[in-house]
Structures are given as structure tokens and as C-alpha cells.
Image: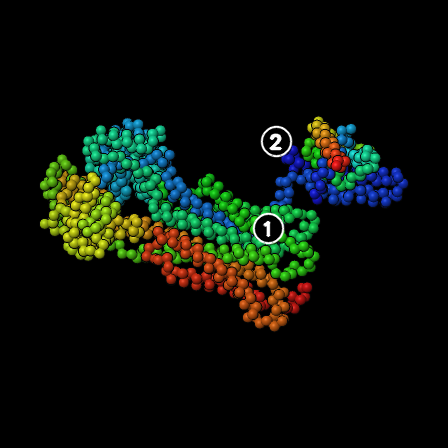
Amino acid sequence: MFAWLAACLRKVFTRRRAESELDEELQYHIEMETRAHLARGLSAAEARRLALGSLGGVTQATESVRAVRTLWVESVWQDVRHACRVLRRRPAVSVAAVSMLALGIGITTAMFTVVDALILRPVPFHASDQLAYVLMFSGRQGRNPGPDVLRAWQHSPAFANAESADTGTAGISVDGIVVARRISHVTPGVFDMLGSVRPILGRLFVASDTGNGILLSEDAWRNLFHADSAIVGRAVTIDGTPQVVVGVLPAEFRFPSWNTAIWQAVSLESPPASSPSRIVRFASNVPRLDALRVATDTARAADPTVAQFSAQARPLVDEFLDPYYKRAVPVLASGVVLVFFVLCANVSSLLLARLTARQREFSMRSALGASRGRLIRQAFVESCVLGALGAIAGIAIGWTLVSLSRSFLPGAFLLRTLNPVDIDLRTLVVTSVAGVVATLAAGLVPAWIGTRLAPDASLRVTERGGTETRGARAATRALLVGEIALACTLLVVATLLVRSFINLSSADRGLDANGKLVAMIWLPKPAFPDPAARAAGARRIEDEVRALPGVQHVAWSYGLPPEGGWTQSGKWQSDAPGAAVIQMDVDGYTVGPEFFALYGIALARGRMFEPADAQGSVVVSERLARLLWPGLDPIGRTFSLEDRGTMRVAGQVIGIVKETHFPSLDAKLDKPQLYRRFSAVQVPAMLSIACAPTCPKVDVVRQLVMAIHPSIRVSDIRIQVLEDVYFEQLARPRATAALSFAFAAIALLASAGGLFSVLSYAVARRKREFGIRTALGASPNDIRQLVFRDGVGVASTGLVIGTATAWLLARALTALQYGVAVTDPITWGAVVGLLALTTVAACWRPARQATRAELVVLLREE
Amino acid sequence: MARPDLLHGTLDLLVLRILALGPNHGWGISNRLQQMSKDGLTTSQGSLYPSLHRLETQGFVASEMRASDNNRRARVYTITPVGRRRLATETENWEQFALSVKRILNGT
């Protein structure tokens, strides 16, 4: 094997010497043969002629030896060089073909990086399928296990590691101003558990950092501390207490949420009132169910209050795989694939047109001895060269698109993933594959059809004889029909998505949470030992807050809209006769009397809570009323919930309020609401303040509340900006709509360009025919009609197929549409109109060209 | 320019046989062919040289440029041990083939 390779290499390098030696060899033969003839008595000239004849032609002989000695690789290389010469001769076509291929490959590459980051590998940690949140679930409610349970789990064989992390908001003091940022309290071992985490400055947490050690995110370090290189070791004030900065984490690290700016090391005995989430890494050698069973037993042994609970795991991956993306991204990916094939079809028809113009060249080659296979190989090598150039340019385009998308679509797609969107080895592999597919798709058909030769083609004097070959014509038209169908499909999808987005963004949210000041207030047990003390404390806080200037409403609650309070899931049954048991999740809030007025949630029927109301009185949202009591008046009715196997009456309706929509209008994600009356302040409670014109500064309110009693804690205090909360929800449909619009535009332009170039080329080849027709009495209109008929015929076939495909596809997309029906006449009308307009525009110039055929010039060419 | 495979292989076989008698150059081999077949075979020398180069590519013969009289260099071919083995195999195959053909032609 190696000897053969060595011989091949040697042959390649000594080719020139070998050629001259072959020459010598054959000359020697001729000399000897001549001498032999001379010896027999023939004249010198005769002898030489016979000698030359005996060899069968020196050129032929040399050629046949070369055919034996040439390596397969050398002949392909020859083809490549010839292809480069041909492509250089027609730069416009080559540039057009390469740019279209590059665009197709580029967007495929960019799309793959997004799909990779969002769906294929959303979590960059080591063995991420072993990571999960674990909580204790009792069938009706879930609870994060306490520190004793966590300690027991750390020593359990079911888990390799068990750590905790929670999220909240904290105030950082920067240059004297306090800014609110998301903070996460984590146990120090969490980074080792996640794996593959490397700080850009400093180090990660060690056990001794608990209580006095924080990590900053790269974002916070750059924006708040101006990328200060001496930040490690500095003390930064968090919520009033100075903490030492231990290191800076890179921007790609986005755990536990995408906007966490500070990580604080806490010990297992975290502050008594908070309930942080527990994250574990399952041991690799224990099956999942067994591990959960062991965890349940361990937990029950460590903490008697969870005796009725069992452990449930929620994979880490699921936290970040947004259901919207799971639906939207495949749609977009298919859009990209469609556009890719449209562009390939365009390149294909371009190449076909070029190849059929070179009939004479191919017939000449065929006469010189090239087989059909050889011709096809030559034509295909030209496509391969284009494909290779397109792939290289495609990587550049893909990289540009990815960089652009990072700055243009931040919230929508990128920040929700833990993995940064970037070009890496996998992407390059995908690019190469895309390049190969593009070359095959664009190159095979033209190579096959373009080299099909009429037997007497080389004998024709004029190159422009007749029209295209039948095969070429059929192929080009078929490609165009395909392109237009694809463009039509994409247009329909894009229009539906754009209209959905417009509906979404102008939808009524049902509440006004903008500008409200919200806070979580802790009244710890030591200072407020019983409910009476807590109620007194709460009343004092309320009075003080009401005294602030501008405050209009104050309300206590459990649960802050629109993010939701607690989720009541399980089986519901209304008291209507013959009512079925419904399994659903409902957003639950416990609210004080001014809550609805504060948040602008309008009352539809019935009344709000009054102090005299029984504990079981509830206010339901319109949607919940419709679900439980369709067509009936729910006021005064009761409903039951399943509790440990039986249905128990859980509440009586006293009022109905308007539905609030969160996270979006999507009925699958949005839950109906249930409001209970806020009776007594537990240790933590949420306070909402509405003021006009604006609320006082967060600092002011915090200090005011904390001044009432030294052990009161205020956390998560912030002014709600509604846009922040709904930002992601709107950004996603906006980005989806924008992207599909871009794809549809590309596809439409590509089809228009394809139609234009094919028609121009056909007209150019039919110039003689048009000249003769004009001479025979056809008017310019008749000629134009011929061309238009060609173009419109292709376009209408494409439109019909495209409409049918789009219809089927639109049904699959109902999940992404809001308020837009599949049969929307405006959408379909707009698409058909746009395509008709494009067709006419594409046919215009070729039609005009056709009527300009100069008869005298044509005749002279004959 | 495809030749029927039979002739391909047959010419190669004959060339190997001639080279087995001693190293030779192209013209010499062609003469020898004519001579040994008592003028029954005259190959178009257009197919002789491709055959020789093919044999060299396959490793059955080795060649080198040698100076000859009349100031020209000639490429002289020598059979290799692998070539000899190949000659033996192909000769046997050919004899089998010829025998079968003869049987069919003479049979009833």
C-alpha cells in the first residue's frame, strides 16, 4: 500500500522527465524500423513513412501510453483546472452561482448553531442528563427539602453530589448608588458538581467562603465595575453587607438563570426563611427510580415533616428548553432547509443553461474520444468547484450571521440557553455536509442533461440553432415550479407568523403591573412569635408605607402577578350537575382587599373580598369560570379538589375577574387564576405598592420598613417594569416572525431571479424564431404574449402546488399562531397577489427583449 | 479506445513470454513476436507500448533507459520475479482455455 502511494507520488513529480523519455522511446522505435526498411532496399522517404505508419500514429501511441500511465487523480486534477478556466471565462454566472450557494450554506450553518445551542445541546455541563432539581412532592403540593434532608442526601449513595441554589434580587452598591441585580445563593460545591466551569478571574468557591464570598458574572463585572482587573479580593456591598469578590464567571455561564449577576456562597443552614431549590447529580451506577426511592427514604428519615412526601426529579435540561422554542425552532429550521433547496435549484438552472450553450464543445470532445461518463464527470467537476468555493464563502457568511444574531436577537433566542451560540467543529462538519448536498443537488441534473448530445450537433455551424433541448427545458421548468412552490409556502408561513405577532403585541394583558413596587418581607419567628404579633407588625408596616408620598394602594399577598403565585394542580370538579372531573393546573394567589384595584384587574361579576367572608370564599378568573361552569352563573357555586383520593369541597365563588395572560396568549402555557382571601401574615409575605406618579426609591422603602424592627428582612424589593416581564414572551414571536419573513423574502427573490434568468436565456436562444415570426407578421404583443405565457404557466403551476403545500403546513403551525386562522383570506390573497406581481415583473424585461430582435442582424449571422 | 479484453491479456502474456527469454526494448519485442509466430502475428505497435507500460505499472516488468548505438537511448524492459510467476499462471490459463475451445469445436 505504501509502496503504491510512494510510486504514485514519484510519478507525479517526475512527469516531465517521463514524457521526454517516452518520446525518446518511440523515436528509437521509429529509427530502428526505418533502418530495417532501408536495409530491405526502400528509399529513405518510403522507409520513414512506413515506419511512422507502423506505430499507428505517434500521437495516438503517445496518447494511449499516457492513458495507461495517468493516475485517476491526475485526470480529475486536469478537469479541475479546466473547470477553473471555464468559470473564469464567464465571471458573472460563476459569481452569481457561488453567492447563491454561499448564502444557502451560510444560513444553514447559522441555523444549525442556533438549533444546536437551543435543542441539541442546551446545557454545557458535564454529563448534563445526570443533573436534576429534586423536590418533595405529596400529590398536591411540592416542597423544597430542608437542610437536614440535603445533608442526608449528600451522604446518600443515590446521588454523586447534592447542592442547593436559589434566586432572588439583591442590591449592589456601586459608586454610592444601589442597583438591583439577580443574585443566587449557592452552596460552594455546586460548581464542582456542574463541571466544566472555569472562572475568567480569580477562583471558584471553596468551603471556607460561606458567608463571605461572592462571584460576579462577566456582564456585571464589565458594566458595573468597568472590567476592573483588581476586582478579586475587593469588598463589594450586597444588600448592605460587604462581601469579598472571589472571582468572575464567564458570560457563557448562565446558571441558575440567564440573568444571574451575583453568586453568594452560603452554608447548608441557609437563612431559615428561604426555601432554596436542591440540585443533585445522580450517581451513574444507580438506576433513576432506585435512586429516587433511596432519596425518599433518606429524606423521610432525616425530616419527619415530609413523611407523606416522595422525591421527584426535574431534569436540569427541561428548565431551559422553552416549550415555545421546541416548537418554533424546528419550523424555522425547515424554513432554512426550504430556502437552501430553492437556492440550489436556482444554481442548478443557471448551470444547466450554461452547459446547454456549450453543446459544440462537448460534441467536439465526444468526437475526440471522450465517453459520456467522462463528459458528465467534467461537468460535475465544474459544479464541485463552485460548491467548494460556495462552502468556503458560506462559512464566512454563517459566521457573520451568527455574530449579527448575537447582537440583534439577544433575549429571544440566545440568553435562554446555557450554551453560547458559536461556530465550532460540529458546525464546520455541518457546513461541509451542506456544501456536498448543495453540489450534488445543483450539479448532478445539469451534468446529466447538459451533456446529452444530438448526434449531429457538432456539424451545425450556428450555435444558436433552435431552442433548448427537450430534456433541458423540462428540467429547468420543473426546477422553477419547485422554487415558486417553496417560495409560496414560505410566504404563507411568514405572513401567518407576522400577523400572529401583531395580534400578540397588541393583546390586552388583563392587568397593569407596570411601575408597581413589590417586595418580599420577612418577619422572623424570634421577634414575631405568634400570629397576633405578626399582624401587628404587618399593620405598622402598612401604615408607614401608606404615609409615603404618592402611595395610592397597598396590598399584601402570596403571589405576585403576572409571574404567578402557587400552582394548584390536580383534579377539579365543579358542583354543576353531571360535571366531569378536569385535570388542570391553576395559578393561585392569596390577596388582600386592595389587590385587584392595585393591579387594575377588573371585576366582571360578583364582588371582591370583604372582611366578613368565610375562609373558603374565592374569586375566579373568567377562564376558570368557563372551564368549570360552562354556560352557568358561577356566583355562589362551589368546586371540589382531589385531596388524598377523595374530592373535597375547596371553595365557593363570590366573584369573577378578568383573565390575566401570562406568559402569553397561548392557551397551553397560560393558566387560569384563582384568588383566595389574604387572612394572616405568615413569616414571609409579599407587599405590593401602587403609587402615582412614581413610586419612591427602593432604598427609601427598604430602610423605612427595616427601621420598624431590626430583625425585619426585606428581600427581592424592586419596581416592576412590565416590559421586562413580558419581554421574552414578545421577543420570541417577534424574532420568529422576522426570521420567517427574511426567509420568505430570500426565497421570493431567488425564484424571481431564477425565472428572470431562465426566461432571458430562453429568449436569447429563440431570437431567430422571434425574428422570423415578426417577419411573418406577428405584432410585438404576440411575441410578448409568447414569453409571458411561458413565465405565467410556470408560475401558476408553482402557485397551485405551493398553495396546497402551505395549506398542509399551516395546519401543523397552529401552535404558533395567535388569533389568526389558517383559512384567513387576507393572508392567502396577499400571498397570491405578491407572487403574481413578482412573476409579471420577472417576465417583463425578457418579453421586451424578445420584441427587439433585429431581423437583418439575425439573417447576417447565418 | 477499449480493446476486447481477450486481446489485452493475450498481448501482455506474449510480451511477458518474450521478456522471459531476456531483457529487450519495444522494437526488439515487436520483431521477436513476428519472428517467433513465423509471421502469423503482427501487432500494431500502437498497442505494444501501452501494453508494456501497463505491465510496468502492474509491477510485472521493470525498465530503464539505456544508451544504445546510434546516439539514442532506448527503454529496456526486464521481467521481474513477480512477472515470471504471472507468466506461469497466465500460460496455464491460456492452455486450459485453448483446450476447452478445441474440445467444443471438435465435439458433437
Q: Nearer the viewer, mark 1 or mark 2?
A: 1
- Give the residue displayed 53% in from the left and 49% down from the top: A441
Q: Chain of mark 1?
A: A
* Residue holding disc 2: A1
- Give the residue displayed 50% in from the left and 43% down from the top: A433
* Residue holding disc 1: A448
Tell me: residue A768, above or below residue A681: below
- Give the residue displayed 43% in from the left and 47% down from the top: A111
Quadrant of the frame with the N terminus of chain A:
top right
Label 1 to label 2: alpha-carbon separation: 35 Å
Q: Position of residue A500 (x, y in %)?
A: 35, 56
Q: Residues within 10 Å of mark 2 (few under 14, many from 20)?
A: few
Toward the viewer: A465 or A431? A465
Question: Callout 2, which amino acid?
Answer: Met
Q: Position of residue A188 (x, y in %)?
A: 29, 32
Q: Chain of mark 2?
A: A
- Give the residue displayed 34% in from the left and 39% down from the top: A317
Q: Counting residues from the N terminus, which is met first, the one under dot 1 or under dot 2?
A: 2
Toward the viewer: A186 or A830? A830
Q: CB under 8 Å between callouts 1 and 2?
A: no
Quadrant of the frame with the C terminus of chain A:
bottom right
Task: From the viewer's perspective, tell me whether residue A312 is left or right of residue B27.
Answer: left
Q: Position of residue A765 (x, y in %)?
A: 61, 61
